[in-house]
Image (cartoon, rainbow, N blue to C red):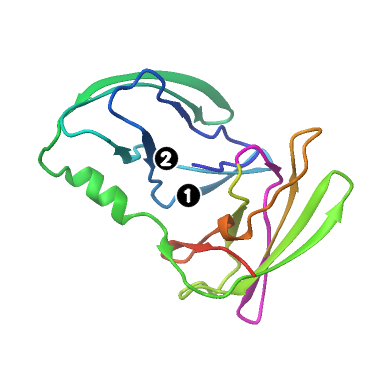
């Protein structure tokens, strides 16, 4: 998954050398939570489809030249690299596997989010509190992302009391750099119940 935890390797894609492609967004279906060797990891079992959305500035074909680095895991995660090359047509038939993967993304849950920030020795601790999404009645797994991939973060610790969830995470910037936090970019993913939920931004 996008944030697999200490027991996983996040997928990374390099699209240098592609033609008529200026941006790429990866859409992640709701992942599964695994526990092994005392560690929690978040990812997918068996088969997963990760839809890629390309920004094509000019009409016509686009040439994809990409390298995908990811982790293939069982008892441990092993890094793997795959080269992707293709000519993308300007139009084509809908692929139902892609449509199903898009439909399996976490649902958007629009609710106020309160963020409390406490300084620590090398960064900050952030406690994010919000109402439990519909159908989430037992303690879920949650992940808080700061919106900046260069910020190192711990696994998120989750507590639930009286229908309210608090997700706590420690954030540490790269050495020698200040920690610039854009509260509007904060993303919280809640994995519990029949499907996942995604919340954005905080007060």
Quadrant the C terminus occupies: bottom right
Out of 189 and 187, give the one closest to the viewer: 187
Query: Which mark is first along the chain, 1 or 2?
Result: 1
The residue that label 1 is drawn on is 32
**Are the residues tagged 2 and 1 within 8 Å (C-beta)?**
yes
Q: Residues within 10 Å of mark 2 (few under 14, many from 20)?
A: few
**Image vertical order of residue 146 relative to residue 118, above or below:** above
As for residue 152 lying within the magenta part, the answer is: yes
Q: Secondary structure at mark 2?
A: loop
* The disc label shown at residue 202, or none: none
| Residue plotted at (42% across, 65% down) | 108
Q: Residue at x 81, y 47 (%)?
A: 123
Q: 102 above or below 202? A: above
Residue 126 occupies quadrant: bottom right
Q: Is residue 113 left or right of residue 56?
A: right
User: Which residue is pictured at 61% across the width and 71% down the height?
Assistant: 113
Q: Residue 7: percent from the left, percent from the top?
A: 62, 36
Q: Which residues are magenta?
A: 149-166
In the rendered image, the vertical position of residue 53 relative to residue 82, given as above or below: below
Q: Is residue 142 left or right of residue 30?
A: right
Asked whether 202 or 70 is in front, the reply is 202
What number is the disc on residue 45? Answer: 2
| 102 up-or-down from 46: above or below | below
């Amino acid at each position: 998954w996008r944030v697999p935890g200490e027991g996983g390797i996040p997928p990374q894609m390099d699209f240098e050398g592609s033609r008529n492609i200026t941006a790429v967004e990866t859409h992640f279906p709701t992942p599964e939570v695994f526990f092994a060797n005392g560690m929690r990891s978040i990812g997918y079992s068996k088969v997963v489809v990760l839809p890629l959305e390309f920004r094509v500035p000019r009409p016509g074909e686009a040439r994809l030249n990409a390298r995908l680095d990811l982790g293939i895991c069982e008892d441990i995660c092993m890094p793997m690299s795959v080269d992707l090359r293709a000519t993308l047509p300007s139009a084509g038939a809908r692929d139902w596997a892609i449509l199903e993967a898009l439909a399996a993304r976490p649902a958007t849950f629009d609710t106020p989010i309160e963020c409390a920030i406490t300084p620590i020795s090398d960064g900050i601790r952030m406690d994010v509190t919000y109402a439990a999404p519909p159908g989430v009645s037992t303690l879920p797994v949650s992940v808080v992302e700061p919106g900046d991939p260069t910020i190192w973060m711990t696994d998120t610790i989750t507590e639930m009391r009286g229908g309210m969830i608090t997700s706590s995470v420690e954030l540490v910037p790269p050495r020698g750099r200040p920690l610039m936090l854009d509260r509007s970019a904060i993303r919280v993913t809640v994995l519990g119940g029949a499907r996942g939920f995604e919340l954005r931004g905080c007060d």
